[in-house]
């Protein structure tokens, strides 16, 4: 039986998704004996991997000790997203098979997304350590915008003190956000950075997405769904790529691969649009405030009367404004926003139908099912199955 060492910091969502892809391959074509090293405190290491009998390695090589261990093992390896210095011709790690993120594609996808929405002002906020994949995303984002005649505001590289303490950095980031022309579309290098931007916008009273729209990368549902407003993010096709990486490693371990090195790349598999980029295209300030209140309370079973009460206007006046601006009732818009959230959660989470129903303000699964089928002519479970099949067919 193959004995495979997996090097993944599982506290990071994208790494857990990578493990899902590998484990899916093992489940179908294994078994393998696995040992996962997460690099966390109190973790049981493999001090001598030869005594365990390792036959293959797949994962991140973050430091010199990892690099040395991988090279000394002298077994088939697939390294994940190696640092650029590991790819130089004089580095032996450059000869290993690898799985790499196409960060240039990520930057281009983000630029195209904002260009389609007809923004004229753009900005980029990178990862705090200015790591290579963040720089690549920035370059691609800027270059794509330049093709259409646009410039981009780049948030400056952080000092050592700012990198170590967001409390120190936030004053500068907040001032930079305030100084941007409005409206501006911001690409954040990854979800953690996007969340910081949205938190500061809320603190400063900067309206999102009317003044600043934010699109990040990785689509970590915990981070993206709990920002205010919920954050749009680029979904990465890592599971299917890691399934292929496991397949490559399996072939290498069984000497079935004529080529010593194979390179697998992954990029964007789609964009999950949430409120942080869904600008309100109406001029009526009363309707804008009503929509903001509805979006903020999408998980609460509020009624039309609650919206009118919040705005301190009569229900009749509110309905008149909605029909004039949107050509529909307040109730229709309430239901539409809830159902759009349901569709997103069916596609991108593993929550049960009942959990989604309560999270989106419905009385239960049966209530949601009726409303969903009336709107989309398909039941929620069938929609989920179809969406997931399409995601695996078109990673």
Image: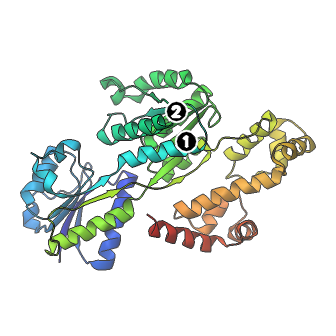
Earlier along the polypeptide chain: callout 1 or callout 2? 1
Q: Are marks 1 and 2 in contact (CB under 8 Å)?
A: yes
Q: How many marks?
A: 2
Residue 374 quadrant: bottom right
Residue 268 quadrant: bottom left
Q: In the picture provided, is 290 more to the left or to the right than 224?
A: right
Residue 114 location in percent, x, y? 55, 42
Residue 59 location in percent, x, y? 24, 57
Question: Is residue 144 visible to the viewer in this orientation of the structure?
Answer: yes
The residue positioned 21% from the left and 62% from the top of the image is 262
147 over 249 or under it: above or below? above
SS of the residue under disc 2: strand
54 over 185 or under it: above or below? below
The residue to which callout 2 is attached is: 122
The residue positioned 18% from the left and 56% from the top of the image is 45
390 over 133 or under it: above or below? below
Colour mapping used in the image: rainbow
Q: In the picture provided, is 383 more to the left or to the right than 167?
A: right
Q: Nearer the viewer, residue 138 or 388?
A: 138
**Residue that sits furthest to the right in the current view:** 316
Residue 110 location in percent, x, y? 48, 44
Q: Nearer the viewer, residue 73 or 43?
A: 73
The residue positioned 64% from the left and 60% from the top of the image is 342
SS of the residue under disc 1: helix
The residue to which callout 1 is attached is: 114
């Amino acid at each position: 039986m193959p004995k495979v060492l997996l090097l993944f910091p599982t506290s990071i969502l994208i790494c857990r998704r990578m493990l899902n892809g590998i484990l899916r391959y093992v489940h179908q074509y294994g078994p393998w004996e696995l040992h996962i090293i997460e690099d966390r405190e109190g973790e049981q290491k493999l001090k001598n991997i030869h005594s365990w009998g390792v036959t293959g390695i797949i994962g991140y090589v973050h430091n010199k000790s990892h690099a040395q261990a991988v090279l000394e093992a002298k077994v088939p390896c697939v390294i994940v997203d190696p640092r650029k210095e590991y790819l130089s011709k004089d580095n032996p790690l450059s000869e290993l098979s690898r799985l790499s993120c196409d960060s240039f594609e990520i930057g281009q996808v983000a630029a195209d997304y904002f260009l389609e929405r007809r923004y004229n002002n753009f900005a980029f906020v990178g990862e705090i350590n200015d790591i290579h994949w963040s720089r690549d995303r920035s370059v691609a984002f800027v270059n794509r915008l330049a093709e259409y005649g646009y410039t981009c505001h780049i948030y400056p590289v952080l000092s050592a003190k700012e990198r170590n303490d967001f409390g120190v950095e936030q004053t500068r980031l907040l001032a930079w956000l305030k100084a941007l022309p409005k409206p501006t579309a911001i690409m954040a290098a990854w979800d953690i950075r996007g969340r910081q931007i949205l938190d500061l916008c809320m603190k400063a009273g900067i309206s999102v997405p009317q003044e600043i729209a934010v699109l990040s990368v990785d689509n970590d549902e915990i981070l993206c769904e709990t920002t205010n407003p919920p954050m749009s993010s680029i979904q990465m096709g890592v599971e299917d790529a890691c399934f292929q990486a496991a397949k490559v490693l399996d072939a290498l371990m069984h000497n079935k691969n004529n080529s010593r090195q194979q390179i697998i790349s992954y990029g964007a598999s789609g964009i999950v649009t949430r409120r942080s980029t869904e600008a309100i295209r109406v001029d009526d300030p009363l309707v804008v405030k009503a929509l903001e209140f509805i979006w903020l309370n999408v998980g609460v079973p509020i009624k039309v009367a609650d919206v009118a009460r919040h705005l301190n206007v009569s229900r009749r006046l509110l309905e008149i404004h909605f029909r004039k601006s949107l050509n529909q009732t307040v109730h229709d818009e309430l239901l539409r926003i809830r159902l759009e959230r349901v569709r997103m959660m069916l596609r991108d989470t593993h929550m049960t139908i009942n959990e989604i129903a309560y999270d989106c303000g419905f009385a239960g699964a049966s209530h949601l099912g009726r409303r969903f089928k009336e709107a989309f002519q398909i039941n929620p479970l069938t929609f989920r199955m179809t969406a997931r099949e399409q995601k695996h067919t078109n990673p």
